[in-house]
Amino acid sequence: MFRLFILNNKRLFMLLQAAKFVGAGLATIGLAGAGVGIGTVFGALVIGVSRNPSLKDELFKLAIFGFALTEAIALFSLMMGFLILFPL
């Protein structure tokens, strides 16, 4: 009734390659989130400066800090994708 599905070496290799590509693609979804985060940071900067122009320098420093943290998440996501594709 139940047949045992035996994977030969070629099929197993192709299955692992497909899983690796899918995993790398899923790991890079974080790049889209980082793009949204960067847009949010600088959108908030524009709103903040338009409400209080005298705080422009302080708000810009905070925006650059927020940009750096958001970009770090994007780089971690990209690094995970590359580590999945090209293991050490």
Image: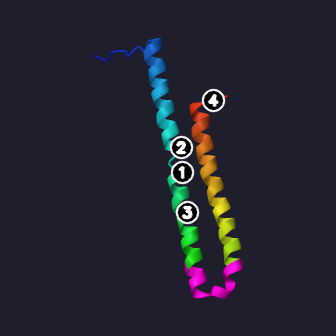
In the picture shown, does residue 46 fall above or below 19? below
Residue 46: x and y in percent read 56, 77
3 or 4: tag closer to the N-terminus? 3
Mark sitting on residue 27: 2
Q: Which residue occupies 53% across, 58% down?
A: 35
**Does the magenta run of residues contain 75?**
no
User: Where on the picture, by quarter, is residue 69?
Assistant: bottom right
Gap between marks 1 and 3 measured at Cα? 10 Å
Q: Which residue occupies 62% across, 35% down?
A: 83
3 or 2: tag closer to the N-terminus? 2
What's under tag 1, amino acid-wise? Gly
Depth order, front residue of 4/48:
48
* Residue under numbered circle 1: 30
Gap between marks 3 and 4 measured at Cα? 29 Å
Residue 82: x and y in percent read 59, 37
Gap between marks 3 and 2 measured at Cα? 17 Å
* Residue under numbered circle 4: 87
User: Where on the picture, by quarter, is residue 72?
Assistant: bottom right
Q: Are marks 4 and 2 in contact (CB under 8 Å)?
A: no
